[in-house]
Image: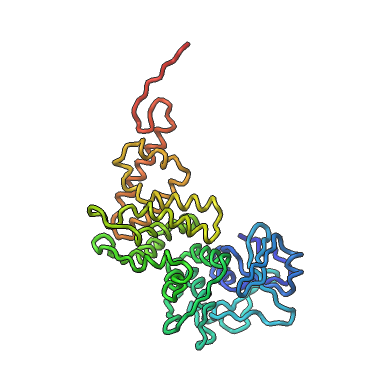
Amino acid sequence: MDFYKNLPAGVFIGSVSALELYYGKELSEPVNLVLRGSLTDVAREFDDVDFPGIEGCDAVARYEGHTCLISCIDEDEPFPRMPFSVQNLYYDPRRRVFMDPLNIYYDIRRREPRLLDEVCCDEQTVIEGALLYSRFKYPRNRFYRGLDYNWEHISVYEQRLLLSRILKGKYAHRGLDILMRTGFISTHWPELARMDATEHAKEHHPEGNAWEHTLETFRYRKNTDLALSLGLLLHDAGKPAAKRNEGNTFDRHAQIGTGIARRFLERLEFERDLQDEVVFLVREHMLPAFIPRLPTYRTERSMSSPWFPKLLELFRCDLSSTFRGPEKYYEACTTYRSFLKYRKNPFRTAEGKKQLRLYVE
């Protein structure tokens, strides 16, 4: 998107957004902006301005239909100092030039982020690191090791924004891993932390426990759609509470996870339509494995949903993360294509059987 070329004078693109421009990636939302001016200038130049009280952000606003996180500085004030060296790159859309006030160009070229203050790694640094490593394929950095974190609960708005931004990153699994290892998830999202203590049988899930399996699914996404990503994040959330039953280690975990997913999304105040879509994905995530062998009357309602193609994509990611072959995914796709074909045919049932029609003149 090139909307940034029309930004008002005195507005600069910073942090991960500037890095995306430098690396030739499409700008993802929300876009990080720095405005030389006051909140009055923000209200004058931008639409739908909100002041959520986020650390390092003075306002959230819309510009030409895009969401922006805006920090305000005085005319003679230096740019905000970000914790990781590569985050201190800025782009001036008016002059179409990058600005490097802290001389960190070689870190960007080498793709080696480093902490500017090695002795200081607080909670906000961890959050910035999680965002950074979810967006770019930088070498693994254990900047958070050996430190004790006493997380304070942050607002629901900040939690939702943080989770959405990480999930929209190509390497979301890396950002989520950082939040888990530093205790952020156990403090704020305990229903996710329980998966890290839920072991899998190695013959079925050699990739690891329920949490490690969840992270592995993100490696196989073909896009960063938020509903799909939330579905992947929550599809096995019911396993910690599920019981063994007749050889099924996690009996009814999809049904249990449905309630957990709904409560989690409601607590973070995601939009209702998005909640409904994610809950559908969690509830039905086991179905694609069985639809080739189930009668159509039992699967017709689910396959008629506009969300079913996304369910197939979740199934592909889920299956691929276990290092199994894609045969079951292709079988499910074949069954779904046949269902769509016959559903449009007035002379056949949804299963493809001929049906009699009585014509009266």
Q: Which corner quadrant of the image does residue 353 belong to? A: top left
Q: Position of residue 272 (x, y in %)?
A: 54, 52
Q: Position of residue 238 (x, y in %)?
A: 37, 58
Q: Which corner quadrant of the image does residue 33 belong to? A: bottom right
In the displayed structure, 350 sits above or below 216; it is above
- On the picture, is 145 further left or further right than 34? left
Q: The N terminus appears in which quarter of the rendering?
A: bottom right
Colour scheme in use: rainbow
Query: Which residue sits at x=52%, y=53%?
Result: 274
Q: Which corner quadrant of the image does residue 250 belong to? A: bottom left
Q: Nearer the viewer, residue 5 or 233?
A: 233
Q: Nearer the viewer, residue 72 or 327?
A: 72
Q: Position of residue 131 (x, y in %)?
A: 51, 71
- On the picture, is 105 further left or further right than 354? right
- On the picture, is 322 further left or further right than 185? left
Q: Nearer the viewer, residue 190 or 3?
A: 190
